[in-house]
Amino acid sequence: MHDEHDSASSWALETLAIRAGHDRTGEQEHGEPIFPTSSFVYGSAAEAARKFSGEEPGNIYSRFTNPTVRTFERRLAALEGGERCVATSSGMAAILSTALALLKAGDEIVASRSLFGSTVSLFDKYLGKLGITTRYVELSDLAAWEAAITPATKLLFAETPSNPLSEVVDIAALAEIAHRHDAWLAIDNCFLTPALQRPLALGADLVIHSATKYLDGQGRAIGGAVVGREAELEEVFGVVRTCGPCLSPFNAWIFTKGLETLELRMRAHCANAQALAEWLEAHPAVARVHYSGLASHPQHALAARQQRGFGAVLGFEVKGSEAEGSRAAAWSVIDATRLLSITGNLGDVKSTITHPATTTHGRLSHAQKSAAGITEGLIRVAVGLEALDDIRSDLARGLDALV
Ligand SMILES: *Cc1c(COP(=O)(O)O)cnc(C)c1O
């Protein structure tokens, strides 16, 4: 018989993205099927007993066993190079499930300061309530990470590259620090995806995904995933199974199909972003561009070493960013767009534009914004797959008016 899983270990990422994880049913379907069923039936009472006890593998109830969800999990695990993946109802559910699985009251997290806003709220407000405390450090400052670790630290959590300034941390070095202190390293790999960065191969223990972003890539569904070793993922599975933040089969199917074009899309996203970053850097109304693909980026060499590409989220500052009126200048560039969508979302074929200081980072105090480099003149673009000329013209309309 033609068994796809036999050869899967030697396949390249592009092939795994298209072929991994699907066990064809007796219907001989070519495309991956959707199983929209809440439960499954058994041939006998004895079979039911064996399945419930775990003695025999098989489907029981779609909160924790669904073939469509499993296909997505196996495919993503193959792409990230992890032993196992557990899918969740959102990226936030992936982070919550990981924390509930691995941490208890009295434990501490050390995290990068430049995290996704809801992740910070989850850590501070909700994990804080459970007696789990979080300390924040500068993403790229390895000495600061190490200094923040105490005997109670169980988890290091980072997003690299950061949003929106594209700061990068050396994942291998951070993993070494984590392991020296008996802590896990979790990397939120949402911005690069396994097509561009594979944290587990660099020594991280867990990879977190918001599948909502590039794994789908077309802005259609909310979902998430955790990938890692069997031991930790069995704990995460236990949380999803019992607490219920599970992924729906329909969304799992969307993400599975999204993964098939992941490598191709990420390559195209990167090419558009690189060209746009270079054009912006040369524009007379632009003071600075934050994109790790530029030679001017302070961590360009590290990014080039640990990533297969530089991603598609970039920040740029209009001239006079610290001065009065730089907010008005940034807003005028945003409001002059007709193609780019004014929204905080990213990871879509549609390019988006946002003003971090008054949206994604609006909850920060003036001092916190200054410390984080979120100036009033800063604009973030998540570069989509429209024609580069059209994206450039759309930004030129507002930028040219500032010169
Ligand atoms: C969007 C996002 C999340 C949260 O994912 P949801 O699917 O929206 O719950 C987490 N981390 C990063 C980096 C994100 O961009």
Image (cartoon, grey):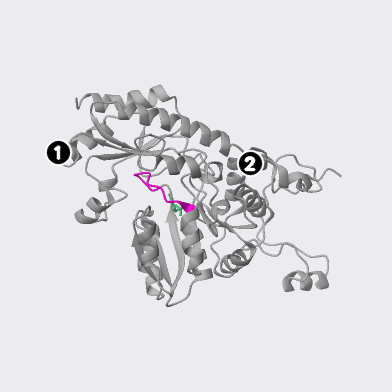
Q: CA distance from mark 1 to mark 2?
A: 47 Å
Report whether residue 113 is seen.
yes
The residue at the point 29 percent across, 45 percent down is 356
Q: Nearer the viewer, residue 362 or 321?
A: 321
Q: Nearer the viewer, mark 1 or mark 2?
A: 2
Which residues are the magenta region?
162-171
Residue 90 located within the stretch drawn in magenta: no
The residue at the point 50 percent across, 60 percent down is 176
The x, y position of residue 41, in whole percent, is 76, 63
* Secondary element at tag 1: loop
The residue at the point 62 percent across, 51 percent down is 81
* Residue type beneath disc 1: Gly
Task: Give the dominant element type of the magenta stretch: helix, strand or loop.
Answer: loop
The x, y position of residue 306, in whole percent, is 50, 45
* Residue type beneath disc 2: Leu
Residue 165 located within the stretch drawn in magenta: yes
Residue 13: image tag: 2
> How many neighbours does mark 2 have within 10 angstroms: few (below 14), some (14-19), or many (20 or more)?
some
Seen in the picture, residue 42 relative to 197 is either above or below; the reply is below
Q: How many marks?
A: 2
Mark before the other along the chain sequence, 1 or 2? 2
Q: Nearer the viewer, residue 384 or 84?
A: 84
The quarter of the displayed image where residue 375 is located: top left
Image quadrant containing the C terminus: top left
The residue at the point 40 percent across, 59 percent down is 119
Residue 325: image tag: 1
